[in-house]
C-alpha cells in the first residue's frame, strides 16, 4: 500500500487532537445547555426531559432487554430492506447500463415510478401486506431501490469511453472488461447511491415502524408516547440519530477504502 | 514469443477510403512502410491523420481498400499492433504496474517492472496514476504498449500535451526503445519539427490524401538543433501551410 497516498494526514511525531475535537464543541455545548435548562426547570420535563431522565430511561429499557430486542429488530429490517432493494437496484442498474435495449425498455417506467412519494404508499402497503414484516421490508426495499438503481445506471453509462476503447484495444472484453474497467469506473457513483439509500432507509423505517409495528425502535417510541414516557421518546429519537450516523460512517469508510485512488478522496472531506 | 518473424512488421495500404457520413476523411490512400521504419505523419487538424492511425489500430474499418500487415489482413494481426493515444488513458484505479500489464496473463510482472525501470519509473509501480506527472503517465502508457513486444507501434500525438523539455526527453526515450526493439513505428503529430526529428520518413496528409513524402536520412538519435533538419522542417512547414 503506497503510504504517501493515504488521504489522512498522519502526524507521527506528536498526535494533535485539537482539530479532531473542534466538530464536537457545538454538540457538547448543546448538551450542556439542555442539561442546565432541565435542571433549573426552565425546560419543563413534560416538554423535554433532561439528559439525566433520558439516561435513566435508557437504563430501564436496556435492563428489561426491551431496547436490545427492538434495536435488533429495527436493524434487521433496515439491513434486510437495503439488501433486497439495493441488490435489485444494483443489478438493474448494471443491466440497463450495459444493455441499451433493456434501458430503453425499462428506464422510462422506472423513472415514472420513482416520482411516487414512497411514504404515500404506506396505506396501500398496509392493505396489501398487513402490518407484518413484509410491509416494512417492501417499503424500505422500494425506498432504497431508486437511489441505488439511478446511480449505478448513470455510473455505468458515464464511464470514460476513452478508457473502454483503450481496454478493448488491449483485448479486454466481457467479464474482464467489466471487472477491470466498467465497474471501477462506475463505483464512485454507485457509492453515492448507497449513501443516499442509507438516508432513505432510516427515514422509511422510522415512519413504517411508527405507523404500524409491534416491535422495533419506532414501536418503542410510539408506545412510550402513549404512556407519556417522554424520556423514552427522546431516547428513541437519539437512537435513530445514532444509527443514521453509524450507517453514514460505515458508508464513508467503504468509500475511502474503495476510492483511495480517486483525486477527490486524497483531499480530506 | 515467436522469433521467426522480423521484429518490425511491414505495412501495406492500398486505395483505402474512409468516410464519416458525407464527409470523406481518407481518399485513395496507398502507402507502404518497410519493416522497422519510423514513419511520421503530419497535417493540419481534420486532415485524416488520426483516422488513418485508428484504421491501422483496428479501431475503425475502412469503407474499401486493403490494409495488410506482413501480407496478411490487418484484422487478423491485431495482437502485433499497439496504439498510444493522445491522452495516456491509464486506469486511475489500477496501480502503475497493473496498468502496464492490462490484458496480459501469465508471468508479466517482472517484465513490467524491468520496463518501468528502463523508463525511469523504477520503484513507482505500486502508485496510482493520479500521483504521476503528465510525462510520467505517457511513459507508463508507452510501457503498456511495448510490454507485449508489438511489431507495429502507432502513436497518436502522444506528446502533444507535454512541455518542451519533457517532449525532448520522450523523443530520446522513444528513439532508444525503437532502436533497441526494431519495431515499425508510425507517429502522427502536428509538430513538424518533432516529425522530422523522429522519422525516417515524413508523410504530409492534406484533405485525406497523401500530399508529400520526404526521406530524412540522418542517423538516430538526432541532435535537437541540427541545421539540416531545421531546414527540412521549414520546407515541410511551407507545404503544410500552402
Image: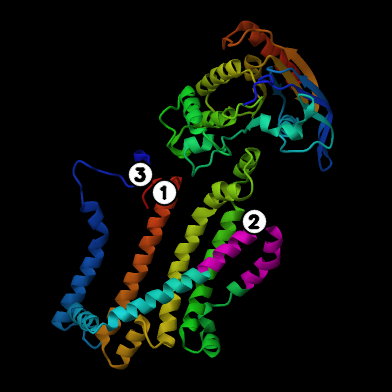
Have a look at marks 2 and 3 and say if they share a chain. Answer: yes
Closer to the N terminus: mark 2 or mark 3?
3
Q: In this view, does A38 lie to the left or right of A222?
A: left
Q: Position of residue B5 (x, y in %)?
A: 69, 21
Q: Does the magenta stretch include residue B147?
A: no
Q: Position of residue A23 (x, y in %)?
A: 27, 59
- Relative to the observer, which residue lies in front, A255 or A88? A88
SS class, disc 1: helix
Q: Looking at the rendered structure, which numbered label has been put on residue A265?
A: 1
Please identify the quadrant where the C terminus of chain B is shown: top right
Q: Looking at the rendered structure, which numbered label has been put on residue A6?
A: 3
Q: Is residue A266 left or right of residue B150?
A: left
Have a look at marks 3 and 1 and say if they share a chain. Answer: yes
Which of the chains bears the disc numbered 1? A
Which of the chains bears the disc numbered 2? A
Q: Can residue B73 be seen in this view?
A: yes
Report the magenta residues as a range.
A86-112
Q: Is residue A92 magenta?
A: yes
Amino acid at each position: 500500500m503506497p503510504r504517501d497516498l493515504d488521504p489522512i494526514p498522519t502526524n507521527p511525531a506528536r498526535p494533535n487532537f485539537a482539530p479532531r475535537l473542534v466538530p464536537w464543541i457545538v454538540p457538547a455545548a448543546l448538551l450542556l445547555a439542555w442539561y442546565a435548562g432541565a435542571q433549573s426547570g426552565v425546560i419543563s420535563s413534560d416538554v423535554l426531559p433532561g439528559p439525566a431522565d433520558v439516561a435513566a430511561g435508557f437504563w430501564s429499557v436496556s435492563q428489561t432487554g426491551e431496547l436490545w430486542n427492538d434495536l435488533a429488530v429495527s436493524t434487521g429490517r433496515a439491513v434486510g430492506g437495503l439488501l433486497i432493494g439495493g441488490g435489485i437496484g444494483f443489478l438493474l442498474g448494471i443491466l440497463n447500463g450495459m444493455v441499451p435495449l433493456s434501458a430503453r425498455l425499462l428506464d422510462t417506467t422506472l423513472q415514472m415510478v420513482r416520482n411516487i412519494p414512497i411514504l404515500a404508499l404506506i396505506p396501500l402497503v398496509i392493505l396489501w401486506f398487513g402490518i407484518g414484516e413484509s410491509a416494512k421490508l417492501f417499503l424500505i426495499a422500494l425506498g432504497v431501490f431508486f437511489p441505488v438503481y439511478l446511480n449505478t445506471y448513470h455510473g455505468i453509462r458515464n464511464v470514460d469511453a476513452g478508457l473502454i476503447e483503450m481496454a478493448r484495444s488491449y483485448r479486454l472484453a466481457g467479464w474482464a472488461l467489466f471487472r477491470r474497467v466498467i465497474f471501477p469506473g462506475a463505483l464512485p457513483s454507485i457509492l453515492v447511491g448507497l449513501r443516499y439509500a442509507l438516508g432513505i432507509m432510516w427515514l422509511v423505517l422510522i415512519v413504517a415502524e411508527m405507523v404500524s409495528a409491534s416491535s422495533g425502535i419506532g414501536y418503542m417510541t410510539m408506545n412510550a408516547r402513549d404512556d407519556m414516557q417522554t424520556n423514552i421518546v427522546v431516547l428513541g429519537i437519539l437512537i435513530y440519530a445514532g444509527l443514521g450516523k453509524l450507517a453514514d460512517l460505515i458508508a464513508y469508510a467503504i468509500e475511502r477504502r474503495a476510492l483511495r485512488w480517486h483525486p477527490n478522496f486524497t483531499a480530506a472531506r | 514469443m515467436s522469433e521467426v518473424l522480423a521484429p518490425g512488421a511491414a505495412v501495406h495500404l492500398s486505395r483505402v477510403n474512409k468516410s464519416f457520413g458525407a464527409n470523406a476523411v481518407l481518399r485513395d490512400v496507398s502507402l507502404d512502410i518497410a519493416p522497422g521504419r519510423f514513419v511520421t505523419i503530419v497535417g493540419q487538424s481534420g486532415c485524416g491523420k488520426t483516422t488513418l492511425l485508428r484504421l491501422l489500430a483496428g479501431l475503425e474499418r475502412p469503407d474499401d481498400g486493403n490494409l495488410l500487415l506482413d501480407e496478411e489482413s490487418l484484422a487478423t494481426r491485431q495482437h502485433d499492433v499497439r496504439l498510444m493515444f493522445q491522452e495516456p488513458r491509464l486506469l486511475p484505479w489500477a496501480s502503475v504496474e497493473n496498468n502496464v500489464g492490462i490484458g496480459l496473463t501469465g508471468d508479466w510482472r517482472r517484465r513490467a517492472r524491468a520496463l518501468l525501470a528502463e523508463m525511469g519509473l523504477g520503484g513507482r509501480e505500486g502508485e496510482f496514476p493520479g500521483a504521476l506527472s503528465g510525462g510520467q503517465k505517457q511513459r507508463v502508457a508507452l510501457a503498456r504498449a511495448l510490454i507485449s513486444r508489438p511489431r507495429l507501434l502507432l502513436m497518436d500525438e502522444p506528446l502533444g500535451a507535454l512541455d518542451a523539455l519533457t517532449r525532448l526527453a520522450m523523443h530520446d526515450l522513444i528513439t532508444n526503445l525503437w532502436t533497441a526493439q526494431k519495431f515499425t513505428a508510425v507517429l502522427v503529430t502536428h509538430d513538424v519539427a518533432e516529425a522530422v526529428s523522429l522519422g525516417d520518413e515524413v508523410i504530409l496528409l492534406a484533405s485525406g490524401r497523401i500530399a508529400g513524402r520526404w526521406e530524412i536520412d540522418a542517423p538516430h538519435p538526432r541532435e535537437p538543433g541540427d541545421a539540416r533538419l531545421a531546414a527540412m522542417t521549414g520546407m515541410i512547414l511551407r507545404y503544410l501551410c500552402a
